[in-house]
Amino acid sequence: MNRAAKNRALTACLALVGCFTVFSFRLVHLQVTQHDEYAAKAADAHGLRQVNPSRRGVIQDIHGESLAQNEPVRTVIADCSLIKDRGAMAEVVSTALGLPRAQLLEKFERETYSQKEKKNIPAQYVVLKKEVPENVAMDLADALAARKMRGISFAQETTRVYPNQQMLCHVLGFVNGDNVGVDGIERTMEQYLRGHDGFRYTERDRTGKEIVPYRGQEKEARNGYNVKLTIDMGLQNIVEQELDAAIKQFHPKSATVIMMQPRTGEILALSNRPNFNLNVQDNVPEDHRRNRAISDMVEPGSTFKIVTTAAALTEHIVNPATMIFCENGYFAAYKLHDHRPYGDLSVTDILVKSSNVGVAKLAMQLGDQKFYEYVRRFGFGERTGVNLPGEISGVIHPPHTWSKISISRMPMGQEVDATPLQMATAMCAIANGGHLMMPQIVHDITDEAGNVVTPFAPQEVRAVVSKSATDGIRNALIEVVSPKGTATLARVAGFKVAGKTGTAQKYDPKTHQATHDKYVVSFLGFMPAEEPAFVCLVLLDEAQVSHDKNYGGLVAAPIFSRIGERAARYLGLTPTAEEPAGSVVASQNIRD
Amino acid sequence: MATNRRRHANAIPIASFMTWGIIALFALCGGLSYVWCKNQLYNTGTEIHALERELAELKNKNEVSLSKIAQLSSTAKLQERYDTGFIKLVPITNDHIVVMSNTAPKPGVGELRPVSNERTGP
């Protein structure tokens, strides 16, 4: 090889070495120095984290009837950049979804500014309709596929459905657009009802299609737990129907019925009026959403006399037969009236006749502090702790803030503000022998297979009064429902009923005085009196009846009677009373 | 001698060709198998994907059916059907109800009673 040839060969070799050195440097630069950056870009372009959505748990009644259920729905989304013939697309979508064609055309013509292209481009994500039923969405997908049209996609979602609509609306509550509970059981049991979404790391090709063999780490979704309530829908239905009938008859401003199992504190039925349809929540007034059983304060009226009497009996200040002079109907020192002029009445008769003077004298014998202590022991002035949101504590003023006449007013349920649930809970304590039970609405939490995850056992708050005292009160309350008492119309054929009526004048915030035309009437009782299966409170606010008929014994007691009769049949209670109620004649004492 | 050398010099190395041929064949088969397996993997992946979609659709249909059943068997719906006369139920009146006591009263002293079906309370 001559010298020139050698030089050419050397030059070629050096050029090649130079080239490969440059390539090698570039390769090292890409693979080592910029590895993380390009790996991230590749992951962005091809990597995908698929979310596997979990299902929200269902809410059931005590027998497993579904009260809140999930229903799969689709959100229909348009990618306007892929739609070729907008008119034809609008025609197909309009027919399937029932949307106006003009509205769809307007959506298809929407544009967004693209940073990349520095100009307006057709919008790639336009929501056409939410909560489209599964079958409608599938029909639309088939129609589009048959016409080979592109640009419409369907996002899988679920919506919450409440099969019983209005029924139990204040207990169940509802969820927001993100399926998060915002009221009722949906809110308080959110941590159990909410599931945990699963995920899967995978890769996709340049068309966006998943490359299944490249699937990576994966985690299964954990569906939410089911919540079983103590509510019995059979009893709830009875309560709802009778409450509807009462609303038709009396047109009250609001009404509440609570039914509880006294031994355990379980709430068997709870209903308020006004109510609302859980499936149609547009334009529902805030007032209708309120669970009045736990968030409204009312003066209990004469039903509160059971607290005073039970306290006096527990402290052995009196016994059921002790005679109390009732000042012939007017206690001048405290400007306190009775409905009728009573002379000497036994403690039992004070309850039976609902004597204001008599019960005030019992409280005076107890003393301010002792009386206040018993009121608090019955749970008034503090939240019951029920598993529902928005519960208030009510108002019980401490003795050092009382006026001179407070000791004569509070024993008969004035100057006291309590929630309907507190009243029902207090009566449960009388019905079960003196144990204050925490009201319970959740029975247990179960998984999908039905295994109990978290049981909610009945909880006794404290022993309130003695067994002998509750026996005495029970006998008196049975007399209240007898022909000589104030609640004759609460009788139930074949059963002994125990209960107390209440009629409270409403307080006028303008005049700071009790009104004479607005009343809260109530009946609070239990049956069968010997072995109570349930305690039931019926409370109506401002029933539209004439002044002389607006009493708990005339308005609320008959509602209790009808509920009691149907509930006894539903529960299969064995009649115990020999004397059937038959035709009941309202006694003269009924005005309370 | 010269003829012999020429014959050896032009000999075709069949064994060597065969060896390389077989190696090439194995390599070819290996390559094709790899491609075939890879293809199978993708096809199976596509099938898995399709089956998963079908399963998800079936789950959705099941959820829809469960929701429908819950609505149709709800207390409110049954009450509505009862009210409209779709379900015919006749309320049992009190005079048609016989209440039977679980326990029979204790017999009086010396009283003769049939022994069948007799239960004495505590």
Image (tube, coloured by chain):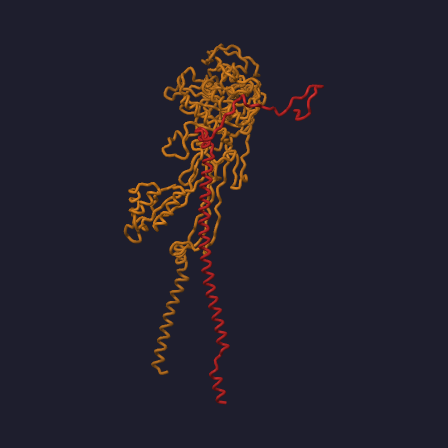
Chain colours: A orange, B red
Say left or right for A87 vs A566: left
The answer to whether one can see residue A566 in this image is: yes
From the image, which quarter does the N terminus of chain A lie in? bottom left
Say left or right for A355 vs A254: right
Please provide percent x and percent y for residue A314.
57, 21
Residue farthest right in this picture: B110
B70 vs A222, nearest the viewer: B70
Q: Vertically, is A12 above or below A292?
A: below
The answer to whether one can see residue A377 in this image is: no
Please provide percent x and percent y for residue A30.
39, 62
The count of marks equals 0
Say left or right for A394 vs A9: right
Please provide percent x and percent y for residue A87.
29, 47
Q: Vertically, is A69 above or below A85?
A: above
Say left or right for A261 vs A48: right
Please provide percent x and percent y for residue B68.
45, 38
Residue farthest left in this picture: A119
A548 vs A345, nearest the viewer: A548
Residue at left offset 49%, top offset 75%: B18
Residue at left offset 41%, top offset 35%: A279
A180 vs A82, nearest the viewer: A82
Quadrant hosting residue A133: top left
Residue at left offset 46%, top offset 15%: A591
Residue farthest bottom in this picture: B1
A481 vs A71, nearest the viewer: A71
